[in-house]
Amino acid sequence: MNTSFDNKKVERISKALGDPYRIKIMQAVKDEKDWLQCQAITQMFNLAQSTISHHLSQLVDADLLHAEKDGRHARYKINKEVFGDYVSYLSDFSN
């Protein structure tokens, strides 16, 4: 397990995943083979673009998503390393 994975980081990730739309966004990004454009994410949900941006920001701040600017557009993909560390951290509770 990553030694820099502390309680504060676990709390930030858990809070980010505490919203049903953020979980749906994570699922949508996970289903993509590569990067997923912000515009595509916005079109999947009946939410304002600013609301989607807020949710994406929370997921990026929790380090669950990688964000990359592509001109005026942004695109996202799962941060598999951090997500794996989080799952590993939680699995310690079942031992």
Image (cartoon, helix red, strand yellow):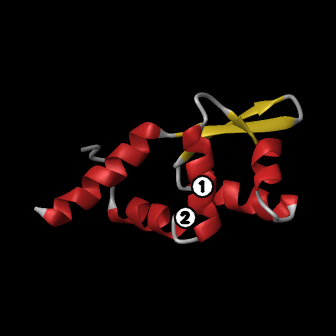
Q: Secondary structure at mark 1?
A: helix
Identified at 63% across, 54% down, the residue is 25
Dividing the picture into quadrants, the one containing residue 76 is top right
Please give left or right for residue 6 compared with residue 80 in the image. left
**Given the image, on which type of amino acid does mark 2 rest?**
Ala
Disc 2 crowd, CA 10 A, few/some/many (<14, 14-19, 20+): many
Please give left or right for residue 32 compared with residue 87 in the image. right
Q: x%, y% of residue 67?
A: 66, 39
Q: x%, y% of residue 40?
A: 79, 43
Q: Is residue 90 above or below residue 78?
A: below
Q: Secondary structure at mark 2?
A: helix
Q: Nearer the viewer, residue 70 or 33?
A: 33
**Given the image, on which type of amino acid does mark 1 rest?**
Leu
Q: Are marks 1 and 2 in contact (CB under 8 Å)?
A: yes
Residue bearing the label numbered 1: 59
Query: Does label 1 or label 2 sit earlier along the sequence?
Result: 2
**Quadrant of the frame with the C terminus:** bottom left
Please give left or right for residue 7 compared with residue 72 in the image. left
Q: x%, y% of residue 28?
A: 62, 47
Q: Nearer the viewer, residue 32 or 71?
A: 32
Residue bearing the label numbered 2: 16
Q: x%, y% of residue 38?
A: 77, 44
Identified at 41% across, 47% down, the residue is 83
